[in-house]
Image: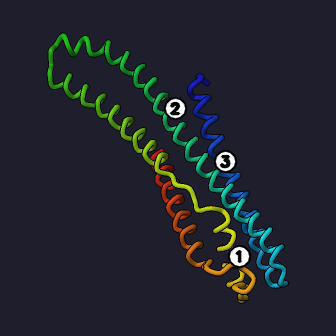
């Protein structure tokens, strides 16, 4: 396997590995959320807080893995472009020989058609690379973990049918923090889906 193709294979493998790690963290997050709910039902808010912190950490770790996977995908796309360029260059070398005959016949229509095809290929590669770079540069970070911990505690308490307002600081509303986090999660998921469609 030529060197560039080997690099491309390694990058795609790394991106899949990062996605697997992200899923693993998501499972851990769900397990920690379950522990939060159980601790709240038992009235042990301190233990619930520890599990909530663990859940948020796993969630952020999962998002970090997804972001890194997207970045590796972007690099893989560029390497794919380079591999394609190598192949196009080889094709061009062969075409140049064939072009000698076309140029000698001075059939301008054939020459123009041939050039249009090559330019179109390069434009497509440029557009794909630019889209990938734009998507990666606009990736945003989530809110601070402490807000997420408070939101998760309230969310789990709501699911458990309990009221934590007496034990937790006032002014924190779980639904607002959760909706912000889930909106950002949805946005990230959509971006990743678009990236996968482009590659």
Name the side, left or right, on which 63 lies relative to 128. Answer: right
Task: State which quadrant residue 111 falls in.
Answer: top left
**Badge 1 element:** helix
N-term mark: 1 or 3? 3
Q: CA distance from mark 2 to mark 3?
A: 18 Å
Q: CA distance from mark 2 to mark 1?
A: 44 Å
Residue at 45% x, 47% y is: 198
**Badge 3 element:** helix
Question: Which mark is on residue 39?
Answer: none
Q: From the image, tell me which residue sits under label 1.
A: 153
Q: From the image, tell me which residue sits under label 3.
A: 18
Q: Are marks 2 and 1 in contact (CB under 8 Å)?
A: no
Q: Is residue 5 above or below residue 137?
A: above
User: At which x and y percent is residue 95?
Assistant: 33, 18
- Quadrant of the snapshot with the N terminus: top right
Q: From the image, tell me which residue sits under label 2.
A: 79
Name the side, left or right, on which 104 lies relative to 78. Answer: left
User: At which x and y percent is residue 76?
Assistant: 54, 37
Q: Nearer the viewer, residue 77 or 113?
A: 77
């Amino acid at each position: 396997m030529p060197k560039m193709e080997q690099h491309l294979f390694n990058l795609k493998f790394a991106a899949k590995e990062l996605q697997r790690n992200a899923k693993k963290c998501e499972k851990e997050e769900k397990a920690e959320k379950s522990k939060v709910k159980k601790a709240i039902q038992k009235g042990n808010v301190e233990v619930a807080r520890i599990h909530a912190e663990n859940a948020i950490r796993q969630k952020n770790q999962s998002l970090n893995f997804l972001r890194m996977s997207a970045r590796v995908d972007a690099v893989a796309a560029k390497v794919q472009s380079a591999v394609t360029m190598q192949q196009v260059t080889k094709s061009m070398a062969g075409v140049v020989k064939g072009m000698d005959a076309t140029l000698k016949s001075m059939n301008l229509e054939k020459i123009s058609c041939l050039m249009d095809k090559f330019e179109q290929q390069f434009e497509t590669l440029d557009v794909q690379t630019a889209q990938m770079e734009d998507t990666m540069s606009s990736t945003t970070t989530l809110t601070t973990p402490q807000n997420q911990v408070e939101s998760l505690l309230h969310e789990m308490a709501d699911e458990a049918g309990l009221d934590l307002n007496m034990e937790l600081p006032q002014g924190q509303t779980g639904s607002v923090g959760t909706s912000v986090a889930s909106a950002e999660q949805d946005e990230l998921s959509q971006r990743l889906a678009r990236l996968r469609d482009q590659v």
